[in-house]
């Protein structure tokens, strides 16, 4: 089984791309959804977050997302601290999830694949590329936020050009080029690669 990552900056549309793969029958692991669940349900992670950010990080046992976002995104050191707690738990959870899947390949969707080091556990990574202005517009609509707030979040992320250079494949999501044909082409490649990998394993 191949393990494929999908990454991209805020507003790039990586979730949309992941959904297309999912429609094709490919299992998709959403790191964002998983991390939210783990921060609410993983006792060790919850305790570590409380130690780092205070009891206010949780309200009635549930993650106080607004408080944590305000504190964490106030300074690069704070977001790095939060990521250092959440990433290992999410990587461990993703690996366990992948081991339970029965498919030629699986998708892991994550904004911080290279930053978290989770690329070490993947065979290939797809980067989703979008123009900056379009990314900002999408993020503003999705999160009901201002351009300034989106730009501040983008500045905390890895440089987009550098990130895309590390990827094995690029999908362009600029609302000019059609997404589905790009995904279908990669799907065919991955199915062939998975078949080769399976045959090689049988010959060992």
Image (cartoon, rainbow, N blue to C red):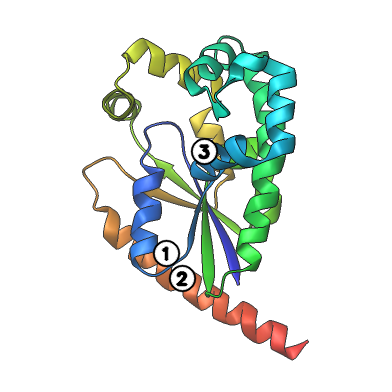
Left or right for 176, reference 142: left
Which of pointers 2 and 3 lies earlier in the amino acid sequence?
3
Residue 123 as seen in the image, left or right of residue 203: left
Q: Earlier in the sequence, mark 1 or mark 3?
A: 3
* Mark 2 surroundings within 10 Å by alpha-carbon count, few (fewer than 14), some (14 through 19), many (20 or more): few
Are the residues at dot 2 and dot 1 in contact (C-beta closer than 8 Å)?
yes
Q: Which x, y percent locates residue 39?
A: 60, 35
- The mark closer to the camera, 1 or 3, is 3
Q: Name the residue under label 1.
A: 186
CA gap, disc 2 and disc 1: 5 Å
**Image spot of residue 185 (x, y percent):** 37, 66
Residue drawn at (73%, 28%), measured in percent from left and top? 47
Whether residue 59 can be seen here: yes
Q: How crowded is mark 3: few (under 14 residues within 10 Å), some or many (20 or more)?
A: many
Q: Residue furthest bottom?
A: 203
Q: Name the residue under label 2.
A: 189
Quarter of the image for residue 196 reads bottom right
Compared to 157, does 190 lie above or below?
below
Q: Which residue is drawn at 58% across and 28% down?
A: 61
Q: Tell me the number on the disc at residue 111.
A: 3
Q: Is residue 158 left or right of residue 142?
A: right
* Residue positioned 68% across, 31% down in the render: 46
Q: Give whichever of 194, 94 is nearer the camera.
A: 94
The residues bearing labels 1 and 3 have C-alpha atoms spaced at a distance of: 20 Å
């Amino acid at each position: 089984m191949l393990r494929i990552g999908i990454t991209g900056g805020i507003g790039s549309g990586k979730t949309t791309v992941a959904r297309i793969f999912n429609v094709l029958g490919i299992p998709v692991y959403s790191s964002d959804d998983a991390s939210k669940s783990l921060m609410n349900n993983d006792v060790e992670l919850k305790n570590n977050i409380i130690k780092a950010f205070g009891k206010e990080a949780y309200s009635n046992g549930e993650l106080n997302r607004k408080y944590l976002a305000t504190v964490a995104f106030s300074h690069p050191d704070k977001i790095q601290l939060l990521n250092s707690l959440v990433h290992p738990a999410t990587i461990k959870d993703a690996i366990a999830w992948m081991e339970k899947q029965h498919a030629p390949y699986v998708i892991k969707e994550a904004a911080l694949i290279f930053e978290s080091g989770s690329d070490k556990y993947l065979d290939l990574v797809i980067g989703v590329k979008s123009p900056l202005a379009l990314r900002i517009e999408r993020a503003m609509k999705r999160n009901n936020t201002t351009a300034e707030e989106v730009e501040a979040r983008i500045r905390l992320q890895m440089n987009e050009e550098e990130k895309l250079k590390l990827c094995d494949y690029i999908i362009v999501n600029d609302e000019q080029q059609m997404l589905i044909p790009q995904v279908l082409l990669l799907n065919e490649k991955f199915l062939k690669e998975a078949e080769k990998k399976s045959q090689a394993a049988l010959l060992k």
